[in-house]
Amino acid sequence: MKSLKSFSSSYFGAQGRFWQHIKPLIRQDTPRYFDYTMGGFSNPLKAFDELGKEIIVNDMCQYVVLGAKSLLEYPLDTNLNLLHSQILNIKRHHGILSQLGDARISKGIEEGKNICLYAPFTTEQREFIDGVCLEFQNNPRMLFAVGKVLINFTFRGVSWCNKTAQNKKSSEYTIKELTDTIYHWYVKLNEFRDLVIMKGLNLSHRVLSCDAQKLSQEYPALHENATLYADPAWPWKVKYDLPNPYFFVARDLSSILLQKQQDIGQLRWDTMTNDEIADEASTWVLNALNAGGKRFILNTQSTNRPEVSLLEQYIQQKNINVVNKIVQTFSGTHNSFDETWLVCEK
């Protein structure tokens, strides 16, 4: 039988590998785990699976929202007999992906990478993907399955790539191959849904897509007696001549799946000062605890801004206690970095 531990959204910055450090920070006396910025969604699933927590998840990125809905909300599909044929023979549509145009190679994150500014697909492939997304627009499981397939045509989920991990050109994939892969992921996600049900899913679990600033005001009851967690899309300290890495899944990929252009308000932090960001993030913490939350865990990295010391300063100015501070050093792609968790209570 599958384990919920094996679920992955292939989302940039997903925190599944940090679960062993996060798990001990979750208060045992809180029945609810509320992830303000769920990202990859794997840790909330583990909080449900291993700790028996009711989980509330939120994110402005519609790709991961679709993934969460496919497991927590969308009904189990008990008849898959005709689904493969339905996907294969989908009516073609000139939608969002089709409008991206032909592939154009651009400079990559490092020399030699086949990074593309535009989706590296043929017209037939683009209109097929658009057709599937349009036809199944009310089925988050199918849309997330399509997203999982499209992630394979990227460089680490941050930009299109004209070759897959299997070193095959994206344009060489047939419609039959794309159909097979979409169907494969749909079946896997359906099995995950079945497993979630078997482990005790109930209607108290919620999937939200709300600006984190407004969560405590719009959903105060969901904060009561909760452990809350946030790893926001912090801006990087170093400015690169590339889009914010979260843009791809939150804006480009999500727009294709929903066939509607997506706007990502939270990434406004890229244009804000360190003090402005620290003030806003600490206000999330304050409002969440005032709404009845028992503990708020705020996570950041040493590659991000603002500095942890500034975050602590703003948190303490709001009469919030940092009852624990965990710092762990990890190895990244090029350099090591510190991961910090600030455990906050009133």
Image (cartoon, helix red, strand yellow):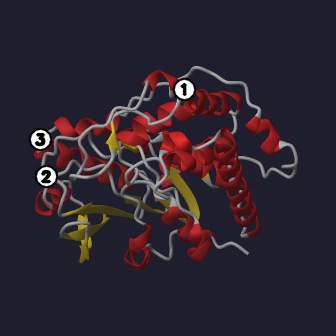
Q: How many marks?
A: 3
Label 1 sits on a secondary structure element that is helix
Q: As drawn, is 323 to the left or to the right of 190?
A: left
Q: Residue at x 51, y 69 (%)?
A: 30
The answer to which of marks 2 and 1 sits earlier in the sequence is 1
Quarter of image, res 314: bottom left
- Relative depth, front residue between 286 and 185: 185
Where does residue 54 sit, x and y in percent of width and height?
A: 60, 63
In the displayed structure, 189 sits above or below 261; it is below
* Label annotation for residue 123: 1
* Label annotation for residue 237: 2
Q: Which residue is mark 3?
A: 273
Where does residue 151 sit, x and y in percent of width and height?
A: 48, 49
Label 2 sits on a secondary structure element that is loop
Label 3 sits on a secondary structure element that is loop
Q: Around disc 3, counting alpha carbons within 10 Å, would you say few (fewer than 14), some (14 to 19), or many (20 or more)?
A: few
Q: Residue at x 42, y 48 (%)?
A: 154
Label 2 vs label 1, nearer the camera:
1
